Image: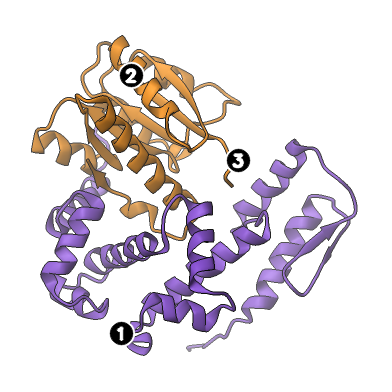
Chain colours: A purple, B orange
Amino acid sequence: MKFYVKYDLEFICNNLLRRGLDDLDLNYHILDSGAITIDENFSEIRTEEIRKKLQAIGISILQDPKEMLVQQIKDTITEMLENSERSGQLKVSSYLTEKLPYSYSYLSALFSEITHTSIENFVILKKIDIAKTMLTEAELTLTEVAYQLNYSSVSHLSYQFKKTTGLTPSQFQNIIRQRGVSNNIPDRN
Amino acid sequence: MRSKLLHIALVDDDEDDRFVFREAIGEIDIHTKLSLFDNGQELMDFLALPNIILPELIFLDLNMPIKNGITCLREIRSNPRFKNVIIAIYSTSSSEKDIEQTFIHGANIYINKPNDFDDLRNALQKVLTLNWQYANSNLNKQNFLLKL
């Protein structure tokens, strides 16, 4: 017998959030916007406890609206890169301004202020991160990876990979492969 | 998040190297707290204590008396308690074999000790910035490798 299931992610996440907050014995209200209000003020230690508790179930507290916007920028970039066949050759700047109601110069300045890096650098980092997964888990060739991530050529991808990680794609692949092998060997000590 | 303190440990038996490292890291605009250890055993004794704040990033020299860097690396990586700790090897060795072996045994970063202060500061700036991205973005930590 075989079943197919469908998730209501929002429902599941909200339940998880409620359970986490209940465990912490808080008098809280969840607002539609994803904001939570709590009817008391806390010490830093208590705030840290709440943060850790929620972190353990995969929920992070966003500290301020700027950080929320930075998170949205990152999510939008990730979504764009992971759906490259639909977003195609679009520039990141036009994609972001299409999805978020701010000018690119504002988004760009805010991103650099909060994250110690530029949007352009983050895009490269994220692309190389996806390339790493494709090379190791999906075992795609460099040519296939370059094509899927819209690189103009394999050598451009290789160059950016080396510049970002200090390693060539094949050195990287080799290390991850050998890590897998050595982890499977039982410890002889 | 800008105000969040990054806990760093450096394990190096050379006093001058520890001194220069502290100076260089102090010049970077990411807020850090640095703990220093003379050798691998000191670090492992510290990590075994209950109720400590675990360092998020550990810089390990390779050649040290009592307990060397590679032994520390393997001990840390065999303990699930430390699975989120990022390990940077900080060594004078530039041997391809050393580099590859430390990565295979679970190091995330390999820094060939620069001779020049500015180079060291720039290398540390790169490491802390990238570490920040891995700590705060949805990037795959399993694949966090950087050679400088």
Residue under label 1:
A89
Q: Secondary structure at mark 3?
A: loop
Residue under label 3:
B3
Residue type at tag 2: Val
Give percent across and percent down for residue A156.
Answer: 15, 68
Residue under label 2:
B20
Q: Earlier in the sequence, mark 3 or mark 2?
A: 3
Q: For the residue carrying disc 1, how many other residues have a C-alpha within 10 Å: few (<14), some (14-19), or many (20+)?
A: few
The chain ID associated with circle 2 is B
In 3D space, how far apart are the residues under numbered discs 3 and 2 (Cα atoms)?
25 Å
Residue type at tag 3: Ser
Q: Secondary structure at mark 1?
A: loop
Taking the image as shown, residue A131 lies to the left or right of residue A154, namely: right
Taking the image as shown, residue A155 lies to the left or right of residue A179, namely: left
Of residues A73 and B96, the one nearer the viewer is A73
Residue type at tag 1: Gln
- Quarter of the figure with residue B17: top left
In the rendered view, would you say A21 is above or below B25? below
Give percent across and percent down for residue A81.
Answer: 37, 76
In the rendered view, would you say A115 is above or below B9? below
Give percent across and percent down for residue A187.
Answer: 27, 37
Residue drawn where x is 15% and y is 70% of the image? A142
Taking the image as shown, residue A35 lies to the left or right of residue B80, namely: right
- Quarter of the figure with residue B139: bottom left
